[in-house]
Amino acid sequence: MRSPRPSLFVVLGIVAVVAIALVHSAEIRARASDGLGHGMPAREAALARGFVLGEDEGVDVATEEDFRRSGLAHLLAVSGENVTLLALLGSALLGAFGVPLRERLLWLLGLVVVYVPLAGAGPSIQRAAVMGAAGLVATLAGRRTSRLFALILAAVVTLVVEPGIAADVGWQLSFAAVLGILLLASPLRSALAARLGRGGWRRALAEGIAVTVAATLATGPLVAFHFETLSTTTLVANVLALPAVPPAMWLGMVGAAAAQVPGLPLEPLNGLCSLLLAYIAQVAEWCAAPSWAELHVHLGVGGLGGAYVGLGVAMVGAVRFARWHRLAKASRVPLAIREQIDTRRLVLAAIAFFAALAGLALGGASGPTSVLRSELRIEVLDVGQGDAILLQPARAPALLVDGGPPGDSLEAKLTEAGVDRLGAAVITHDESDHAGGVEELFGRLPIARLVYGRLGHASLEAARIAGATPMRVAAGAVIRSGPLRLEVLWPPPELLSQPLAGADPNTQALVLLARWRDFAMLLTADAEAEAVPLDPGPVDVLKVAHHGSEDAGLGALLDRIRPRLAVISVGADNPFGHPTAATLATLSDHGVRTLRTDRDGTVTLEYSGGRVAVNGRQ
């Protein structure tokens, strides 16, 4: 018996509820975020917010690093998994209250629509929402939906809304993961079920492992290409975390919903959720601990295409072997052959997908790859009273460290430098003369990663919406682009894990050491040497801290690092008296040649053949 059609009154009621929820989505999100902290330890509360709402800024640096190294970082970014689990939870609850199927599907459609802004409206959740909505609409129409069609529809819709999103790393990874699951999970599940058995928990285990392996295979080359790292423990970590992830998500979602009702006790629900989250965090810590848990690789453009071609060839070989093995044992050869034909079609589709995905990634890679006469070009841009340092390695994505104050035409300066996309933008600390220009780039210039130590929620939200992947770092982290390395020297993780609590944000600004072959440049942001202990060894160039403000520790720092050149990023006729006479005298006393943007304009360093040219001169 078919489910009755919902009445017009019910449809209008659902539309009204969804509209009201969308209007008040900011308040709903705030109450959910607050509710997820009741009755949980701080670490687990931050993880719950990351799992359910995509708010990962509260996760401490050490835990975030564990999740990244173990290959579990995707749990901190809302994606298709969230939409699937939300739909399952909503369907079960509505069914328990006796809501008819078609009305239930309408409620689920509305729930998915509301969840998008609550979860940050990033590219992965947009794609998942369109896919989920397409499936629900097809079911309401009484037609058998195709997951591949839904994915294509999601791609078309997101590209129409934002054509440049195809170059976004998160968008590529999101679609790669789903396509990998659609094309590879079924044969992997069958192979695992043949070994594990098909009943009860064995089937669920086979399904979970198959999905994990399929998504990992499909996204691995892209991760290596864009981030130049690979987690060697990702499969183990995801399989170990698998039993706890869905119930943790469900409990978190129920807790977020219950938080909308004032006075409702959340502690029992959150307490149970925190146990599951603690287990997942422990898995991440175990799998991130070995020194070999993360490999640093430079895949390159050719390597990316080669990786997908190699994966396709390996799949063909595996299927041929499986066919031979099945035929050798099969008692019903015709059926085995028919199954094999289906599998071969699947493999051909998979190869076509990998080729298309490689082409998409290679096309997206063409933007950020710098074509330079030199091996490395560094520009300390003249952005007035602020910092903005552009690093362009040859044949690798450009990196930007800070963006100066808002309203200084940073985008035009980057365009003039030949940059139409950034592999990463670093905000050393959350002050407008460093962060303002970067924030103006959101939605106007593709940025793969937003690297930060401390940053406000609004900025992180804007970055996610623009398609940039937030990456919180502390001392010991490394940001790579080809052979270029930005080593984070300061602050330590334990300092970032504590509240700022009125402390001077300059003292917790990210301090970076840029390394290229035998060349090194120390980027000190606003972290003055008198307050921040630094000893990176000898460097070639020093970017003077805090626009050349007075710094009692500068002399001792110069004795340790012995730079040949110092650059001061400072605005002309600024009201702060920067750079101070004392700072200029200290640099002069140490025999350090000094350039300043207020007088010399943009300072350009070009490294080639072991030599450095400054503003066109050796």
Image (cartoon, rainbow, N blue to C red):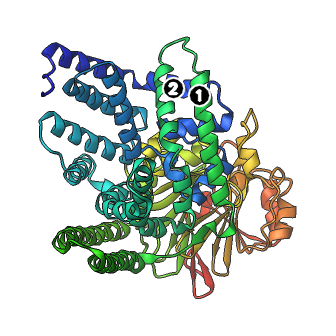
Q: Tell me residue 72's x, y (percent).
A: 54, 53
Q: Tell me residue 427's x, y (percent).
A: 58, 51
Q: Secondary structure at mark 2?
A: helix
The alpha-carbon separation of the residues under discs 2 and 1 comes to: 7 Å
The crowding category of the residue bearing disc 2, from other C-alpha atoms within 10 Å (few below 14, some 14 to 19, many at least 20), is many
Q: Tell me residue 347's x, y (percent).
A: 26, 71
Q: Nearer the viewer, residue 145 or 354?
A: 145
Contact (Cβ within 8 Å) of mark 2 with mark 1: yes
The quarter of the picture where residue 112 lies is top left
- Residue picked out by circle 2: 255
Residue at point 32% right, 71% down? 358
Q: Residue furthest bottom?
A: 609
Against 484, residue 116 (above or below) is above
Q: Nearer the viewer, residue 319 or 64?
A: 319
Name the side, left or right, on which 442 lies relative to 313: right
Three-letter code, disc 1:
Asn
Three-letter code, disc 2:
Gly
- Which image quadrant: the N terminus? top left
Residue at point 15% right, 26% down? 3
Q: Residue furthest front?
A: 331
Quick check: can you spot residue 415? no
- Which image quadrant: the C terminus? bottom right
Name the side, left or right, on which 78 lies relative to 72: left
Q: Tell me residue 158's x, y (percent).
A: 27, 48
Q: Secondary structure at mark 1?
A: helix
Against 443, residue 502 (above or below) is above
Name the side, left or right, on which 485 lies relative to 180: right
Quick check: can you spot residue 334? yes
Against 425, residue 99 (above or below) is above
- Residue picked out by circle 1: 270
